[in-house]
Amino acid sequence: MAYRAPGLLATLCHSEGGLRTPGHSAWASFSCARRGSSSGGVLATGPLPALPGPPATKSRLEMTRAAHVDLLRSSSSLSINTLRSASKEGGSGRAAFKYRDQLKHAKRIVVKLGSAVITREDSYGLALGRLASIVEQCSELQNAGHEVMMVSSGAVAFGKQKMTQELRMSLSMRETLSTKDTLRGEEVKKLLAQRAAAAVGQSGLMSLYEAMFAQYGVKIAQILVTQTDFYHSDTRRNLRSTVNELIALNIMPIINTNDAVNPLGQDMKIIDGKMEIRDNDSLAARIASEVETDLLILMTNVNGIYTKPPTEDGARLIDTFNPKTINSLKFGPVSSVGTGGMDSKVQAANWALERGTSVVICNGLAQGAIRDICAGRRLGTFFSNVNEPASQVETQAKNAREGSRYLQTLTPEKRASVIQTLANLLKKRQGDILAANEVDLDLAQRNNASKSVVSRLALTPSKISSLSFGLAQIADTSKHMVGRVISKTDVADGIELTQVTVPIGVILAIVKSRPDSLLQLAALSIGTGNGLLLKSSNETSHSAKVIIDLINEALGSVGARDAISLISGHDDTKDLLQMDEYIDLVIPRGCSDLVRTVIEESTSIPVLGHIEGICHVYLDKDCDINKAIHIVRDAKCDHPAACNSMETLLIHQDIFRKPGYFTSICQTLHQEGVTINAGPKLAKALTFGPPIAKSFRTSYGSLECTIELVNNLHEAISHIHQHGSSHTDVIVTENKEMAEIFLETVDSACVFHNCSSRFADGYRLGLGAEAGFSTARIHARGPVGMEGLLTTKWILRGDNAAAADFTNGTRQFTHRKLPVGNTNEADAETDDLQAKE
């Protein structure tokens, strides 16, 4: 039996701070080392010698301790400390993280589960589904090397469930046998019932936790505390030692107030800088401070801190809360199933923040809340002494909204002048743009970026010239966009209805490795009167900074400088997709992974885009082989990374059988460096052919494609509908009848006859530029120019018109369509005035 040194871990944890882990300031001065040999080696601090003992192989416990300390020593404590604020808060010698994205570096984490999170709505029993999700997330963190502690409510609810069952079964018998009911006083009955429920429910709650965590290989231990346990330094030191011993053994502590004896319903008090334990919020804050945690997550049943109770009108969720603004808050009532309220949570959070623990108050009912917070995502209310992360983006979004409304008030000529100014600035500042782009290209190549990324990233004099020309086109076309009359209806005598085009509002464009897209999106937004938020990738940071300066300079010429902003810094894409109060439309421009992520995560804001560009070229039996080769080469090789590049080539059996045709096509592709994959039919027809394609739904985005054989036009169309992405599909044929069937039948955004799929582009189709490409079936489809960034509104003009007049027969509807006449509402009003004069 291995010899265990008495009090060894207590010795390790004897200092006021206890055993420290990476991310804690005391670690540097508390250097733990593994000492001793195979015969009874032990852990010691500083000069503490190895304790003697009988020769024996080290116990599993000692090996676990040694391995854990070695792990702690190998972790980079300095990397976490350097992320923290240089200032010392609350005299604790520690400082909380300043920004949300730094939370991903949190090592020691306390998760507090509020009663409303894990309790059923009837307050009798636990919400097992929610609890299972939380257990899973905490287990993932624990198994990933984090040090997780839980402060859990739920004992009262669990106990109420058991007690209710007991009362229902035996109430009549007790009333018969008992001559005196001591629980007749409602106040006393309620108070005692709460404590009794806690006593009954505590053991059951822990048994449930033990069973659930065991599914993930996580061991737990319960620690029950009361207010008096924090009165004396000895009991506080024992608490720290116990927690740290459990953590060193990779056991998750679950800490609860002993509500069976703890005072209930009392206000939280802070005396001499010490917080009294009145509920699990205050307990979580005290524990976080005592064991110096990096992050405290307070989970409740609302999304975070609001400026007033969330059920009241005008309540606004606070993303980042500065404790200095606490007096501006208005708190609601305490939860019916808990002992704390939002007031209690805010006080506890502020107290912990002052002592160097970062705090997030979040909705525990949200899916994956703990994962998202620990990943630095925007969820709940983050407590920080700086407001910068949230206020900057929110200000930009508000400015974009106001900028959009201001742009709408300008004449079409004024908006067009801004775009023309931007086009001129492109030529004038070409040197600055290319110099910044050269820096981005150099960094991309150093980071071993793919050829497709470098290709999208690169700007050249010819590309800038084309951009400038395209912007001039947009400027000219924009004069007839906003306020254009779509329809007019004479509803009744003296009542006229007009439908006109208006901007969508504020657009969030997420652009990856495409600096030219920033300019196109800006011009299209200005021309349509939309505000714009540009989220650019790191690869384009230098180019984007120069470009946004040009955009703002052009907008400044009409006093709308802030209508378009570049978002940079700590804001995560997922966070931006939650800002539905400011953003009306999201346009992702980049790889399929980016678009897929945006579509999946934007649950409340519409997304305009497409995930894959699986474009087909079909060579009909009546195609001209020279045209076919020319079109196929362009469709695949002109820009392989583009979404309108050909991915699958379908060949009619008759073309395949014609001598030299198939060979000529393959040789052309091979000369361009294209890797060919065969479909099942082609592979069967060839004795020695290319490898079989893994899937017909592969978007290669490179010099690679799939070739398959079809028996006729209808089989080609069926293949496109089954395996395509509704992007762009092409038929090459001299048979106009077959071409028309293809054009009318294929259900894609773009369908071409004897034209390369590369024409599926806003600039090439005369739109000046495109905001993106949409395969959706509502609003906008295909290359999205200015038309796709507009919606409509209905304007009704009348004189003393009331609906009741038509119900009682006093007036009659005419619903007569009127000629539209002028294409712009403003122009129409001008013409009407001139006619009257």
Image (cartoon, grey):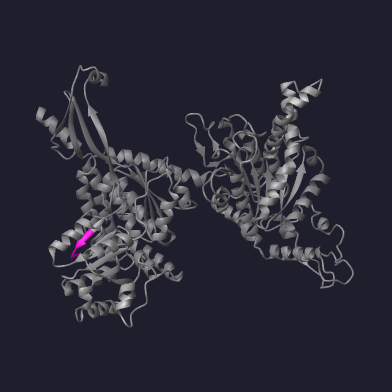
Stretch in magenta: 751-755
Question: If the image is split into quadrants, where does the C terminus sit?
Answer: top left
Residue 827 visible at all: yes
Position of residue 53 in the picture relative to residue 725 (left or right): right
Front-most of 461 and 247?
A: 247
Quarter occupied by residue 67: bottom right
| Residue 62 in the image, given as x and y percentages of width and height | 79, 64
Marks counted in the figure total: 0
Question: If the image is split into quadrants, where does the N terminus sit?
Answer: bottom right
| Residue 584 in the image, given as x and y percentages of width and height | 37, 43
Residue 762 visible at all: no
Position of residue 216 in the picture relative to residue 609 (left or right): right
Residue 490 magenta-highlighted:
no
Position of residue 297 in the picture relative to residue 45 (left or right): left
Q: Residue at x 75, y 21 (%)?
A: 184
Quarter occupied by residue 91: top right
Front-most of 211 and 409?
A: 211
Q: Which secondary structure dominates the residues rendered in magenta? A: strand
| Residue 565 in the image, given as x and y percentages of width and height | 38, 48
Q: Residue at x 25, y 67 (%)?
A: 617
Front-most of 81 and 742?
A: 742
| Residue 97 in the image, given as x and y percentages of width and height | 60, 50
Q: Is residue 78 above or below residue 654?
A: above
Q: Is residue 92 above or below residue 121?
A: below
